[in-house]
Amino acid sequence: MIEKPYAWEYKFLAYVIKDDFDKLQKHRWNFKYGFFTTHIVSLNSIELLDDISIKLKEIMKLNGILEKLLNSAIQEAIGLPGEPADLEKMVYASKQFASLYERIVAWALYFKTLQTDEIFKNLLQLLYELPKTMFTQMDDFVDKIYTEITKLPDVKDDVKREIKLSCVLDEANIADINSEIERLYGVLC
């Protein structure tokens, strides 16, 4: 950073995000093994269905926050070509990105804490696995940003480079969750 080689601001962002995401390993393992640190929650059928409705709205809002973070905060931190980047905002965006990952892991692990009728077992598993593709996309985004940006040369070489990074979150298993909820309403009502 002191020497400020070519693309140093982008490299700074890549290193900060990679470092923040490397620190999330225990959360990845918690999700992988279904380890939770909160208390068991016991809900009856009606309470559970109401709770699931709220939790689905929550994950959609978290997804919206993630999109805003990627499409606005990080973009503003980087700045337009030829303009200096905002390093403080880069650190902020990186920390928020990692924090969001942690929140989504906690969201998923909540479904491991629920104690309810056996009829809900499949639905709870579907809900637990819902953010799995989000985690993959977020991890892949960080790996790609790190790989693509850190391989830029330290000296401007007049070679035009275009780096396209995206984090498209898949909501494909929402249909399975909705089908299971409809099936349960049919059985219970």
Image (cartoon, grey):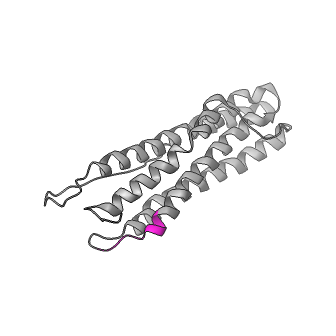
Image point (30%, 65%), residue name: 4
Q: Residue furthest top?
A: 118
Is residue 171 visible to us here? no
Please identify the quarter of the rendering in which residue 64 is found: bottom right
Instruction: Work out whether residue 118 or residue 178 is closer to the camera in this orientation and state it.
Output: 118
Nearer-the-camera pick, 63 or 77: 77
Residue farthest to the front, as pictured? 2
* Location of residue 123 (image quadrant): top right
Percent x, y of residue 140: 42, 42
Compared with residue 57, is residue 27 higher up or lower down, i.e. above or below?
A: above
Give residue 23's quadrant in the image. top right
Q: Which one is nearer the viewer's eye here, 17 or 170?
A: 17
- The mark tally for this picture is 0
Percent coordinates x, y for residue 179 in the rendering:
63, 35
Residue 162 location (% of width, % of height): 23, 55
Residue 70 on the magenta segment: no
Residue 185 in view in this figure: yes
Vertical side of 106 occupied by 2: above or below: below
Q: Nearer the viewer, residue 19 or 161?
A: 19
Residue 88 is inside the magenta segment? yes
Relative to 83, residue 100 above or below: above
The region drawn magenta spans 83-90
Residue at left 48%, top 49%?
A: 19
What residue do we see at 61% from left, 33% from top? Answer: 29
Query: What residue is drawn where x is 31% and y is 52%?
Result: 149
> Which image quarter holds the C terminus?
top right
On the rendered image, what quadrant is the N terminus found in? bottom left
